[in-house]
Amino acid sequence: MLGFRVDVVCPGKRCGEYIKTAIHDFEGDQTYSEKPGHLFRLTASFDEVRVQEYCGIYLAGGRAPEYLRLNRMVLNIIHCANNIALPIAAICHGPQILVAAGILKGKTLTGYFTLKPEVEMAGGIWVSAADHEAVHDGNLVTATTWMAHPEILRQFISLIGSNTIS
């Protein structure tokens, strides 16, 4: 539709394998609920990712970032992408990976509200954005929850459009 190839990868997994997703929702409790999601087919092998072949990196939220931020290869991908000013989008808990990668000093961003202390300790400038808003700073676009998907994707696609690889 937009002319971009989208690859979905996961450390330790190969193209064609599946990952289980979780569905988070806000049902009036003090935090989000988590329900079993869908099986999602991976479109590429993680260990074959070459950052230079991509127009951007999108970091999904949820529980995965708390584990992905411990993976050196994930952090290397983020470092490489940031060093070449590749657009990076992170939603919900996705900024935890950016914190662990150490690329937030002086950057303005948002995420799920519980990330504020981590972001600030990493030198980031926290913005309390509404659930439907996204925050853009340089090559980064961040948002708080899934409710901001339309806005974070609009801004991310706009950044990618100026960074298309031939």
Image (spheres, rainbow, N blue to C red):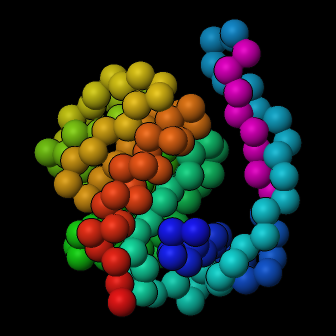
Report which quarter residue 36 is drawn in: top right
Of the pair 104 and 108, the residue shown nearer to us = 108
Which quarter of the image is occupied by the N terminus? bottom right
- Residue name at image x 30 percent, y 53 percent: 140
- In the picture, measured across the screen, residue 17 lies left or right of residue 1, that is right
Of the pair 129 and 158, the residue shown nearer to us = 158
- Residue name at image x 21 percent, y 35 percent: 125
Please provide percent x and percent y for residue 166.
Answer: 36, 90
Please provide percent x and percent y for residue 116.
Answer: 36, 29
Q: In the rendered image of this protein, does residue 76 appear above or below residue 101?
A: below
Please provide percent x and percent y for residue 11.
Answer: 63, 72
- Residue name at image x 73 percent, y 15 percent: 27
- In the picture, measured across the screen, residue 5 lies left or right of residue 13, that is left
Q: In the rendered image of this protein, does residue 130 appear above or below residue 108?
A: above
Q: In the rendered image of this protein, does residue 104 appear above or below residue 113?
A: below
Q: Which residues are magenta?
A: 20-27
- Residue 32 in magenta stretch: no
Please provide percent x and percent y for residue 94.
Answer: 49, 48
Q: Main secondary structure of the magenta part?
A: strand
- In the picture, measured across the screen, residue 22 lies left or right of residue 49, that is right
- Work out whether residue 100 can be spotted: no
